Image: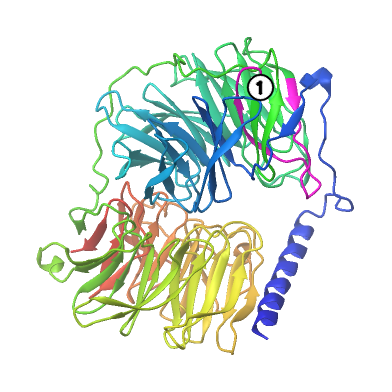
Amino acid sequence: MKDFVERTSNSIFAMRCFAFFLLLFSSFALAAEPEFAESHNPALYGQTLSVRKVENSQATSDLAVHGNRLFAIGRGHLTVYDLSDPKNPRETATMFGMAEPRQLVWFKDHLFITARMGGLYVVDVSEPDLPRLRSHYDTMELATGIVCGTDPTSGRDLAFVCQRQFGTEIIDISDPSHLKNVSFVVSGEAQSVDLENGVLYAGDWGTRKLTIIDVRNPEHAEIISESPIAGLGDGVYVRGNIAYAATGPDHIEHPLYDVKGHGLDVFSVENPRKPVHLGRIDLPIQAQHVFPDFWTVTVDEHGMAYVADTYNGVFCIDVKDPTRPRCVANAVLPKTSNGRPDPAVEVVAGDGILYAAGMNGGIYIVEAPGIARPVSQERKAPTLDGPVLPTLDPLADVRADFAVLPTQGQCMAAAPWKDGLVWVAAGTDGFLLVDVSEVSGGGKPVVKKTFPIRSFAYDVKIAGSLMFTAEGEAGTGIYELKPNGEPKPVGRFDQLRPVRQVVVQDPKKWLISKSGNSSVTFLDISDPARPRNAFTFRNPFGILYGRDVVETPSPSGMVALVAMTNGIVWFDCTGETPCVKTTSYDPRVWFNHGACLHRGQWYFFADRGFRLMEECDARKLDDVPLHVCKDAAGKPLSGFGKCASNGKEIVFTNRREGEIAFIDVNDPQNPKITRRFSVHAHPEIPVFVNGKAVIPCGHAGLIVEK
């Protein structure tokens, strides 16, 4: 019966959402699904190259070649191939266990592999046919693009890992077994990056920009220029004084069919502070915009660019005259079981040959004699003039009002326990029991106990003597807290995707666990030793990024989910099985909006303020009055964020922009920001001990209000 209820409830919700989006795009013909091109016009895109699949190769998201080895990742695997015969790669090793591999780079006998929600994996390939996991690092968000290099000033080896909405994280990889956060820089929506001479080049996806960043001082990176490109940004590559940006659709809110914008933009970056657009080549209009939605480019020293453009295939583009790039050859990858061409998401050039990564099918050999040549690493990119920026104190603005507990791992969540003790989920540090009782008297927060785990500590909640935890790839944990604070394992629920959030709806019945990019699971914890899946909701559209389940469930048994592009979803937990009660079906609801229950009233934060909502409110944002929150100088909130109530006021945190604001809502029609702070960190949802805010701040540590 439970399975039927789960399937039916999800199906009804999905069908309603689908109907809503059909109406939203009703101006487009939906009668017949268009087909993707199986070949391209040779007059526009050059000769058609022959393609064959590498036997037994698996779905592949990225490739790298070093020496006579080809490294491939995709859908949980790393596979190594011997290229002694370049046209016939021979598999020599396979390694499994990575959550969602996206990009990889070879650097100093190691592979650095981004894995979206799985963070960053470091694999030792000093013996390439015996790869071994060296370390696993908890990135600040969805790890997507990566480039590695050595800082010429300090001699540190650094990885630059771009994480879309949350910018690019800079990580010290000098010791591959112990990675350390250095800093980060936020740009539009960084999806891929390139690095040369202390200058970082980012392809920003949703904002459609080539963003150039001064990283000569990694502790203080700064954007120095932004240039529009003709489609959604991703792959970037710099050679000489030229930067190349691969692009996808020309809009996010694009029509379903006849998608324009795919192509390659070319810029002069002789002065990285003032790029000059030189040329552009448009690649074929795609039949649809569907996943995967990422594109790559590399350029050899002879002026040939190699572009992977998903369903369009791979292209060889002559860029010797950067003002007039022209396509000389192309190849559409073979169809897979879904009837569409295998989307090409990476292409690596060899001598007369291309290796193409097919997202769904595997690796392909593309014969390109006289066209393809290996890409040299000597690129002679421009340097940057001007003084190097001074090092930042990321918490300078809060030190007078908050005590700081530095941590090595990133602090993601906190839960008050007793007597001024707080449990903190601190990423790679595991769970920390922290005494904050002396802070109000001028003391400092002190770690009393460390509880390491095999994965990352993302979230923690406490109800009575039980502690509930989100432990990434290790799933959801349930512990009994002994009087001395020692956690005793009681139960565990393993899930297919990393668990990032837990919310206790009823400590004797329902625990909510958010895992992966789209799943919210309601666990029956009547027997804590044997948690059971009672109902799973899957977000039909968009991504569930982090703390999307509202942290304060209603006493009436309702739970709210801020579901990106779907609206506010309300769940009813009063019956035998939780179910979807209603939703607003609102595409304006975004991942970084937030809500909380304050004095019996729901506050939904977005658009620089909040809206007062009723329980199970199905209205869209634009149908509810907005109350903009401003400080005494008239400056409003930074835009959107999460929130929590201490009973007297609401504390707002914007994890992306680094804002913390205390808001007086005694008169909801005239809210006032009474205190606000700006940090170069990622402030999470606060909790309160004796009325004082305790705020996890990512890699900057834990801050406790004095």
Q: Which residue is mark 1?
A: 353
Provide residue 592's location: percent of width, then percent of height.
49, 57
Q: Quadrant of the C terminus?
A: bottom left
In the visual, does 22 lie left or right of 690? Answer: right
Provide residue 384's location: percent of width, then percent of height.
37, 19
Q: Is residue 162 visible?
A: no
| Residue 300 forms part of the magenta stretch | no
Identified by mark 1, the residue type is Ile
Task: Please name the residue shown 69% across and 32% down the image.
Answer: 262
In the visual, does 371 lie left or right of 494? Answer: right
| Residue 340 forms part of the magenta stretch | yes
Task: Please name the residue shown 47% across and 56% down the image.
Answer: 640
| Location of residue 45 with respect to 380 vertically, above or below | below
Task: Please name the residue shown 54% across and 19% down the image.
Answer: 375
Q: Quadrant of the N terminus?
A: bottom right
Q: Secondary structure at mark 1?
A: strand
Residue projecting furthest to the left:
442
In the visual, does 399 lie left or right of 277? Answer: left
